[in-house]
Image (cartoon, grey):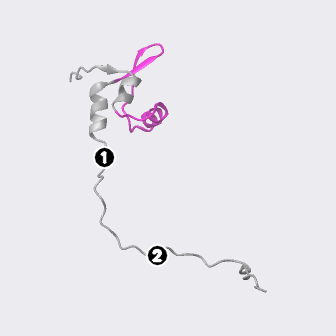
Amino acid sequence: MKEKQSRLLRFREIRERGCPSRASVSRRVRDGSFPAPVQIGEHSIAWREHEIEQWLANRPRVSYAPAAAEPQSKPVVAPARGRPRRQPQAAATA
């Protein structure tokens, strides 16, 4: 089967499309959760555009809709520890 011809994207281009940092990309390539790059020179790599587009399309969507309001409860405050503090005494008037 013939592989789909696609543009090759350098890291700067995939970063502009919303991909993670260089370190995250390297880690995800190693664990198989990001497309592997193609060697295009002795010290150069690039990614196939269609693989990056497919990876981006398969990312989970985030909903920013407000969650259902839950009843507000008072925060639990731990009791004070140790000896109680002295209350300042009112100045005696002469």
| Labelled disc at residue 60 | 1
Image location (x, y in percent) of residue 29: 42, 33
- Residue type at tag 2: Lys
Disc 1 versus disc 2: nearer the observer:
2
Specify which label sits upstream in the sequence, 1 or 2: 1
Which of the 4 image quadrants contains residue 52? top left
Closer to the camera, 22 or 47?
Answer: 22
From the top left corner, tell me how far across and down residue 83 is, in percent: 74, 80
Gap between marks 1 and 2 measured at Cα: 35 Å
In the picture of the structure, the residue carrying the numbered disc 2 is 74
**Percent position (x, y) of residue 47?**
35, 24
Mark 2 is surrounded, within 10 Å at the Cα level, by few (under 14), some (14 to 19) or many (20 or more) other residues, namely: few
- Disc on res. 34: none
Residue drawn at x 47%, y 30% is 22
- Dividing the picture into quadrants, the one containing residue 39 is top left
Q: Are marks 1 and 2 in contact (CB under 8 Å)?
A: no
- The magenta stretch is 18-47
Residue displayed at 49% across by 73% down: 75
Q: Is residue 56 magenta?
A: no
Q: Is disc 1 surrounded by few (<14), some (14 to 19) or many (20+) residues within 10 Å?
A: few
